[in-house]
Image (cartoon, helix red, strand yellow):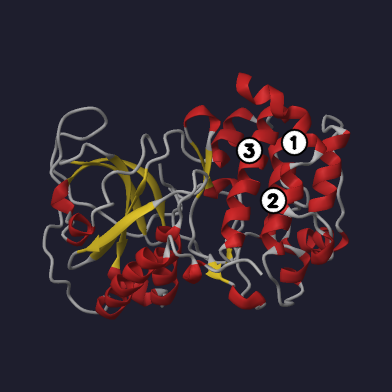
Amino acid sequence: MRSSLAKDPTDSGRRHSLQQQSKLLSMRLSNVGKRTGSRGALQGRNSFSSSNQRLSTAPVSSKVESNPRRSLMVKKSGTAHTTRPPTLMEQSSKFKNMTLQDFEIGKILGKGKFGKVYCVKHKETGLICALKAMEKKEIIQYTIQKQFRREVEIQSSFRHKNLTQLYGFFYDEKRVYLLMEYVYYGELYKFLKNKGPLNESLASYFVYQMANALDYMHSKNILHRDIKPENILIGFDNTIKLTDFGWSVYNEDGQKRKTLCGTIDYLSPELIKSREYDNKVDVWALGVLTYELLAGSPPFEEDTKEMTYRRILKCDLKFPANISPQAKDLISRLLQFEPSQRILLSEVKSHAWITHNQDSWANL
């Protein structure tokens, strides 16, 4: 059995520290915070505004939310972005004393049910980050304190080039702020929407990186449970980073999960049938993602949820003519009805479709 996150000697100290801090935050969410400083100092350079403005995390209107994805539950915005290695949050003393006044506040990167994500610049180090601002009252209203705490603990433990890093969090009287790395080119979903299906060279490179990220998470007994292009960010040199760990969960000791979560087009058969499941739901989702990268839309997408579910349960795959036989083989092996029959992530990385395209990655 693979080692768990809690038993990893390189991560245990940091995870213990974040657990203590997130527990403390969880207890204080319903109270008035001790810290002040609800505005950021705005400077007139680069993409940062020169006028003073109040950070707003008011609920977003339906006009702003243009994402057509059919999520099972209301999700938070998962936008985050990275331009250089993290140097800011390595010192715990700085982390503990962080306030909004330490940042210059720039443009809005994303909006969601529980708040907004801003591009910010740390004044002392110059590090560009993504800052997710969430209303405490919203966290309490939707009773997601436990989910929020788990998200903080899980994301802060990661040290992988294909996973967005959480530098830390802080809070004031009204809001909680998550400080994350900034990934320059934004969501893969928007890229696909603007550019259409990817060529097989780029698609294979993205799939290889996703398999790496998921293999790392699963080795720490963590499930993501909400893989989709909206939760994948594109950085420099076509490096992708998985983000939004709001539905991620520890899955130690081989236990099965029961919670129904995710996005309809990416649900596995066992989720639809309300069966217990494990990390193979992420493997299924990788198959759906691979298909969408090459075809431009999910493989089982239909007009209604019921029709989509019907096709998923039948594994009703219909491939466009432009998808190569090797890609079809990998997708078919990922999208197996029985979880135990799905290809291993280690086998994904060595699959013929991946190795055939590997030499072309340097020219992307």
Q: Amino acid at mark 3?
A: Phe
Pointer 2 residue: 286
Q: Residue at x 46, y 38 (%)?
A: 186
Gap in angstroms between the C-alphas marked 2 and 1: 14 Å
Q: Amino acid at mark 1?
A: Ile
Gap in angstroms between the C-alphas marked 1 and 3: 10 Å
User: Please, what secondary structure does the residue beneath circle 1 have?
Assistant: helix
Query: Is 39 placed left or right of 86 in the picture?
Result: left
Query: Is 282 placed left or right of 181 in the picture?
Result: right
Which quadrant: the N terminus? bottom right
Specify the farthest residue to the front: 9
Closer to the eye: label 1 or 3: 1
The answer to whether residue 12 shows anywhere in this view is yes
Query: Is 282 placed left or right of 194 in the picture?
Result: right
Crowding at mark 2 (Cα within 10 Å: few <14, some 14-19, many 20+):
many
Question: Which of pointers 2 and 1 lies earlier in the amino acid sequence?
Answer: 2
Pointer 3 residue: 206
Q: Amino acid at mark 2?
A: Leu
Q: Residue at x 74, y 28 (%)?
A: 357
Question: Which of pointers 1 and 3 lies earlier in the amino acid sequence?
Answer: 3
Gap in angstroms between the C-alphas marked 2 and 3: 11 Å
- Label at residue 354: 1
Residue 47's spot in the image, x, y percent? 27, 31
Residue 330's spot in the image, x, y percent? 81, 44
Q: Is residue 21 above or below residue 60?
A: below
Residue 354's spot in the image, x, y percent? 74, 36
